[in-house]
Amino acid sequence: MSLCNSCQKNQASVHITHIADGALTPLHLCEECAAKKGITLAIDTHSGMLPTASVEPGQSDDALKCPSCNLAFSDFKTKGWLGCSQCYTAFEKQIDQILMKMHGACIHVGKSYESHKMGSEPALNIDSLRQQLERAIKEENFEDAARLRDVIKTMQFAPSQSEINDTSL
Amino acid sequence: MRIPAAIGWTFSGTPDSDVVLSTRVRLARNFETFPFPKAAHLYIKSQVFARIADVFNTPDLLPGYEVFNFNNLDRLSQEIFVEERAVSPDLVRMEGDRGLMCDSTRTRCIMVNEEDHLRIQCISSGNCTQELFAMANQLDTILGEKIPFAFDARRGFLTACPSNVGTGLRLSFLLHLPALIITKAIDKVLNAVQQMSLCTRGFCGENSEIVGSFFQISNQQTLGQSEAEIIEKTQGAIAEIIRSERTARETILHQAKSAITDKIARAEGILRFAHTLSMREYLNLNSALRMGVNYNIVTTRTVEEMNIELLHAMPGHIQKNVGKSLTEDEINRERALLIQSLFHDHDQKIGKTL
């Protein structure tokens, strides 16, 4: 996260593009300096910055976790990206609010798709990985087995932190 | 020296190429069963990459594609793909198995394991949105039959960032708007663009500054509208910008012909004789010369040649051409030499001596 361009002290949480004389200048401000400049929170959907002000900041939301990938809702708010497709169900209420702000809609009306036609694969969770690990050991494929053990370890002990490529926005 | 024209977005003969350098249509897609790339362990990313590579290696399914795994690719080759606009700079910065499946002209580029598992991108010069969408849509249908995509009837195609969910469709136009800058009408146009939920960026994409009057404009909303509606709305806005730029060019020609002719001639002079050219300076001069080409004042270049030159003046291409890694100062000198040699070749062709 960058520092506020104005006070150079607080973390910048408001990201806007200033247009003047044909030049686009990105401005990163803390909420305090943004308020002083009379700037209301903008949504920069391209950079993935979320309209956090629109989401209830309560403890209960932050503590929510996706049962499939273990991403916490608080992580999503800081990073700006979800962990897996199941996150959309896990954070359904919160995401609906975000989608309304971003797109002015929360219902898809475009191209349709049916993945079940091809026979869906089992979801990737610890149990399925354990089965893959057992199979790899049985087949003496130790390279894959070592990798799978790493993945399982990651998912068990530090699911949303250690192996995530943190590209803070 | 002769530079081969191989990259699709440099080609000429496409509509509105006096203002629109290139159009890109992108569809974001993900596997339903794997975590999204930024949350995925490297092993999972390798599984995703292998699955997609398998589809492209299926005989006769998608002929003419090459598969590049950036995990086994040197940094310079990765940079070349960024400059060709086949992949994003973010892809280079990421870890693990990730990369690109593309055709030889980089018109169809499928980026793998960037923010989403798949980014199906079709790029060409000029304003060809409908054709590019048809191309991307066809690829999407073929890939969707082999890869189980994350899709839910209510939210559409699910993406790592909710800003892409629904259609996953992003249209990006690289526009050259020098006359709107000169006539100071650009602020009004860009403000109108923002009001229409379109986003403006610089030549090099996200977080890049505006140089050489080049602007990237793209739609922000991907949900709640059909693909056809998104295309129609965005195309309408782009058509309006094109009209404004052309009107501004006419105004300048009528009201300030000598000033603009002088500006273009000076740009040509610097390009011909400079011994060092930074990328920033080059982009500004390319912009002025491009204006001269549009006005038929400059006859030493065509739009296509300007596009090819622009690509080959980028740092990665210069280093590839020289065959070694260079410092920024060395790159700037090589860039000046390259441009000089292009003018020299043209002069020789027409028998001109200075």
Image: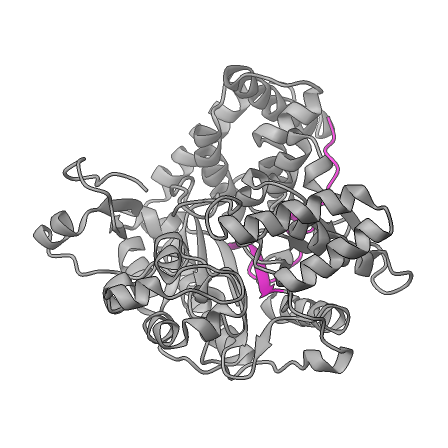
**Where on the picture, by quarter, is residue B134?**
bottom right
x, y percentage for residue B285?
46, 33
At x 51% / y 47%, what residue is drawn?
Answer: A164
Q: Which residues are magenta?
A: B1-30
The image shows residue B348, relative to residue B330, as above or below, that is below
Is residue B236 something one can see in this rendering?
no
Tag count: 0
At x 52% / y 73%, what residue is drawn?
Answer: B231
Q: Is residue B99 left or right of residue B165?
A: right
x, y percentage for residue B26?
58, 62
Q: Is residue B22 left or right of residue A75?
A: right
Quarter of the N terminus of chain A within the rendering: top left
| Closest to the observer, B240 or A58 | A58
Q: Is residue A35 left or right of residue B82?
A: left
Is residue A124 something one can see in this rendering?
yes
At x 68% / y 54%, what residue is drawn?
Answer: B109
Name, please, the residue furthest toward the left: A36
The image shows residue A155, relative to residue B267, as above or below, that is below
The image shows residue A127, relative to residue A104, as above or below, that is above
| Closest to the observer, B57 or B186 | B57
x, y percentage for residue B179?
38, 50
